[in-house]
Amino acid sequence: PVTNTPDKLPKSSIPGVKRIIAVGSGKGGVGKSTVASNLAVALAKTGARVGLCDCDLYGPSIAHMFGTDERPYQNEEQQIVPIERYGLQLMSMGFLLEDDAPVIVRGPIATRYTQQFLRQCAWDHLDYLVLDLPPGTGDIQLTIVQTVALDGAVIVTTPQEVALIDARKAVSMFQKVNVPILGIIENMSYFLCPDNGKSYHIFGKGGGEHEAKRLQVPLLGQIPIEMSVREAGDEGHPIALEDVTESTASMAFLGIANQ
Ligand code: ADP
């Protein structure tokens, strides 16, 4: 009999997808969606077929970062067909909602909706599906990591202690359900001043590296704070689409994707 412990629940794969990678963070605002978007773009740049799914019911941002207000349609099999942008297949829970519509969905309904949503998408032969999880380690996140057969998870944090404390919780959530931690991505690691070429460690130095060692997981990369990362996100054109010579951050994302 299937017992109700997290690692005993049956996990299901997603049709049309070879590998599923979750991007999580303990704390909000550390750049998880920015990292998920750019990682997806950088993976696509390596020649892989990539999809990106925004699983944040309460604050979806992928549509905005990819500059689209296109809505997916349902095919004859009643599946939702992801939209295409920059060669990637995109889905977002936000695509199914009207702008500014408040999402009043409580825990159990939200988790059921999330699961159903993930299985109903018509992904077209993906090598990688990147799941941008909501921040934190609540019910929705737990349901996703318990029921979707994830191949691995990456954790996004800043070097700041308050972010690291929450990142630890995210790591232990994945470990509890036997999802391999592919590594930690330290975002907003430093600011490279264009005027004097000096690096400034605005949120502290070495926090991600130290945490990765402590948890015995790889530090996959360090992304600098760059004005163009924020601008590109706001303009709907993730920075990783830029040539790596134009941006240190873009180069860092490609470095991570190549691992
Ligand atoms: P989260 O998904 O963790 O809530 P976001 O990805 O939405 O965080 O990022 C929060 C804000 O910080 C956004 O405005 C984004 O453009 C900005 N941002 C994220 N990473 C960087 C970075 N490396 N450099 C500059 N701005 C960044």
Image (cartoon, grey):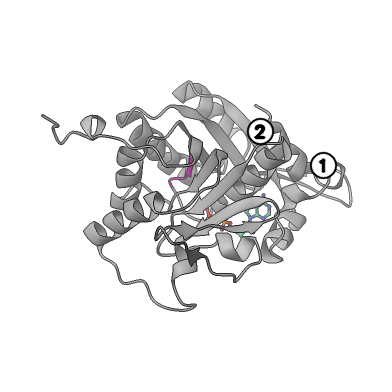
Q: Is residue 64 above or below residue 100?
A: above
Q: Is mark 1 within 8 Å of ligand 1?
A: no
Left or right: 243 with respect to 151? right
Going by the numbered disc 2, the residue's amino acid type is: Ile
- What's the residue at 57%, 47% (across, down)? 51
Tell me the quarter of the image containing the N terminus. Answer: top left
The quadrant of the rendered image in which ligand 1 is seen is bottom right
Label 1 is placed on what type of residue? Val
The image quarter in which residue 215 lies: top left
Residue 176 magenta: no
Question: For this rendering, which residue is in front, 90 or 259?
Answer: 90
| Residue where numbered disc 2 is placed | 256
Q: Looking at the image, which residue is at 55% across and 53% down?
A: 33
Few, some or many residues within 10 Å of mark 2 (<14, 14–19, 20+):
some
> Quick check: 109 left or right of 181?
left
Residue corresponding to mark 1: 244
Marks 1 & 2, CB-CB < 8 Å contact: no
Q: Residues within 10 Å of mark 1 (few under 14, many from 20)?
A: some
The segment highlighted magenta reads 22-26
**Left or right of residue 39, residue 244 in this image:** right
Image point (51%, 57%), residue name: 91
